[in-house]
Amino acid sequence: MDFALSDEERAIRDTVRTFVTREVIPLEAEVLRRERAHQPGLDRSELRELQLKAKKFGFWGLATPEEYGGMDLPAVMQSLIWTELGRSFVPFRFGGEADNILFHATEEQKREFLIPTIEGERISCFAITEPGAGSDAANIKLRARRDGDDWVLDGEKTFITNGNDADFAIVVAVTDPEKGARRGGATAFLVDRAMGWRSEFIQTMGEGGPASLIFDGVRVPHRNILGEIGQGFTLGMEWIGKGRYTIPSHAIGIAERALQMAIDHANTRETFGAPIATNQAIQWMIADSETELEAARWLILRSAWTVDQGLDPRHASSMGKLYGAGMVNRVVDRVLQIHGGMGYTRELPIERWYRQVRLYRIFEGTDEMQRLIISRDLLRGYTKIGGHLA
């Protein structure tokens, strides 16, 4: 059993780390200053400039198929890269990406939505969550009613990432209430903002914020159905599934950077004539953090590995998401404690991470939903204790 990275994986990871160190981390002081002034950390043009710099490093479209100009990297490699991006709180992501379910589009839809999104000319958002349908995504109520060659959408979506900036939304709507969403009663639509939906900013404890999307008699051509009628819930779960290993991969990077800050501080901060690193209380917080970080790393890499092996990744991904999200919250909390009052200020990124990572236990499947999936799989015999090694 070999736990080492391949030469290629190590080389790509190190190249991303170099890019983050040279191009992204130097922006942190300015990003913190802007956020303290209630401004976006990066504007759209600055993000685009960084993405083009990354493209010169060879990084464009990590998950995008090669036929569309992407790298089509395996899930394990993507996980390693997301970890490196997590080392900085600057809101940067590589360009050349599009929602994974957009590749189900027709050729006409690809020209109108997919290709411009990959090229950075358009911004998308995925809209399934509603005020009464979060973890219970099958309980969506936003209705799409057929009217000739159009569908008319009425209802509201909420907590939609990129909803304030998106040019178009991928909206999962109820098309057959009798069937219900899980049994083919929901359909995905590609809906331009110009068709009439509006977004309303939702203020959260984190930086930036999601949006509510309001649909009031929005008419969408039948040709804008993504996939097939009745396929909406399946596509929605496919979209959410990818986040189950990318989000906790990002959490590993945050935890690594934060823990190193705690170690550096503990070795230099003195109280009562000695570095606080000599205190057992500090040593145990560091030891617990490193142990949990390493455990999370292997759970998350294993969940990505199951994707690359063509295995059903849901059980492994739920364990990785559950443990990774909890781990980063505990590590950042300890790091803040080690820094004392300074960690609580907005001069350092620690309190920012503290607010940011709290979301990790909620979006793309709450802790409670991950526990439900894990226990259900075991109780119903869908998997065995010990997974693929059982």
Image (spheres, rainbow, N blue to C red):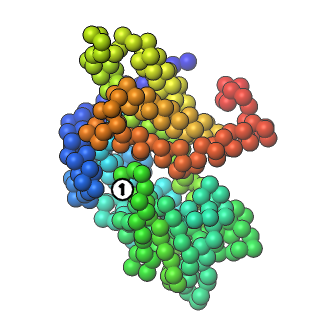
User: Callout 1: few (<14), some (14-19), or many (20+) C-alpha neighbours within 10 Å?
Assistant: some
Query: Picture coordinates of residue 124 (x, y %)?
Result: 41, 64
Report the side of 232 relative to 124 (left or right). right
Please tell me which residue lies in front, 73 or 317.
317
Q: How many marks?
A: 1
For the N terminus, the image quarter is top right
Query: Picture coordinates of residue 58 (x, y %)?
Result: 27, 42
Residue type, mark 1 in image: Gly
Residue 161 shows in this picture: yes
Report the side of 315 relative to 360 (left or right). right
Query: Picture coordinates of residue 344 (x, y %)?
Result: 34, 37
Residue located at (46% from left, 24% from top): 289
Residue 229 shows in this picture: no
Residue located at (60% from left, 43% from top): 367
Residue farthest toward the bottom in the current orientation of the protein: 148
The quarter of the displayed image where residue 256 is located: top left
Please tell me which residue lies in front, 308 or 22.
22
Residue farthest toward the front in the current orientation of the protein: 272
The quarter of the displayed image where residue 13 is located: top left
Residue located at (30% from left, 16% from top): 271
Query: Picture coordinates of residue 133 (x, y %)?
Result: 62, 62
Report the side of 62 relative to 171 (left or right). left
Report the side of 73 relative to 49 (left or right). right
Residue located at (47% from left, 26% from top): 293
For the C terminus, the image quarter is top right
Q: Secondary structure at mark 1?
A: loop
- Looking at the image, is 51 positioned above or below residue 162? above
Q: Which residue is mark 1?
A: 208
